[in-house]
């Protein structure tokens, strides 16, 4: 599919950094498929369906909403990309440690699927410190989530951790 990309992630939970990258990707590509990775071997705060709903709510009413598709997937990302006929993967990198991991993954994906490229996007500099792990810890301790996640995600986290 020409001028399309896949933005994969666990999005557990969706953060303001994810939304920032998604918005910028929607302005770069005609279509962005957000793929919510579901790994039953890992414990998640939100189910795959809940994560899809949280993303849908986050983009509702945005001028670029129609460019976004949201799906769950399991398995190898490159197989999903081939199935969707998309040859660009988008990955967010906040810091050097993210880049090192994502770089290895991009090289692995290239070895398995040379036709698929990876593009790295950095979130707005004010959002580079946000991670889902930090957000979950703040939520678990009842902290203020307003600068880390959209309001509806903060509400859902409070419900999960109450």
Image (tube, helix red, strand yellow):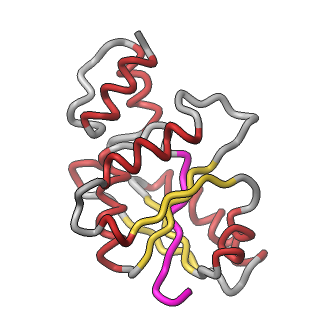
In the image, taking residue 116 as reference, residue 20 lies left or right, namely left
User: Looking at the rendering, which quadrant does residue 30 occupy?
Assistant: bottom left
Which residue is located at x 37 percent, y 12 percent?
141
User: Looking at the rendering, which quadrant does residue 78 occupy?
Assistant: bottom right
In the image, taking residue 35 as reference, residue 151 lies left or right, namely left
Which residue is located at x 34 percent, y 34 percent?
153
Q: Residue furthest bottom?
A: 2
Q: Point out residue 21 in the picture as x, y percentages from the top left corner.
A: 35, 61
Which residue is located at x 58 percent, y 41 percent?
48
Is any part of residue 127 visible from this angle?
yes
Q: Nearer the viewer, residue 4 or 21?
A: 4
In the image, taking residue 26 as reference, residue 82 lies left or right, namely right
The rendered magenta stretch, by its main secondary structure, is classed as: strand
Q: Residue furthest top?
A: 162
Q: Quadrant of the N terminus?
A: bottom right
In the image, taking residue 158 as reference, residue 120 lies left or right, namely right
Q: Quadrant of the C terminus?
A: top left
Q: Nearer the viewer, residue 85 or 88?
A: 85
Q: Nearer the viewer, residue 53 or 154?
A: 53
Q: Point out residue 119 in the picture as x, y percentages from the top left corner.
A: 48, 74
Is any part of residue 108 visible from this angle?
no
Against 56, is 69 above or below? below
Q: Which residues are magenta?
A: 1-10
Against 31, is 158 above or below? above
Q: Is residue 138 magenta?
A: no
Q: Count all numbered tags in the image, as a single digit.
A: 0
Q: Is residue 6 magenta?
A: yes
User: Looking at the rendering, which quadrant does residue 111 occupy?
Assistant: bottom right
Q: Point out residue 68 in the picture as x, y percentages from the top left corner.
A: 41, 66
Which residue is located at x 70 percent, y 42 percent?
39
């Amino acid at each position: 599919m020409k001028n399309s990309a896949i933005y994969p992630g666990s999005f557990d939970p969706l953060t303001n950094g994810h939304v920032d990258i998604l918005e910028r990707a929607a302005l770069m590509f005609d279509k962005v498929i957000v793929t919510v990775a579901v790994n039953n071997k890992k414990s998640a705060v939100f189910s795959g369906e809940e994560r899809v709903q949280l993303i849908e709510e986050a983009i509702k009413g945005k001028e670029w909403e129609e460019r976004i598709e949201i799906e769950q997937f399991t398995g190898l990302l490159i197989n999903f990309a081939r199935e969707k006929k998309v040859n660009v993967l988008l990955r967010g990198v906040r810091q050097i440690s993210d880049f090192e991991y994502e770089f290895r993954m991009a090289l692995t994906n290239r070895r398995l699927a040379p036709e698929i490229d990876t593009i790295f996007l950095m979130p707005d500099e004010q959002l580079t410190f946000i991670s889902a792990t930090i957000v979950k810890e703040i939520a678990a301790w009842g902290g203020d989530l307003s600068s880390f996640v959209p309001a509806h995600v903060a509400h859902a986290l409070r419900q999960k951790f109450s």
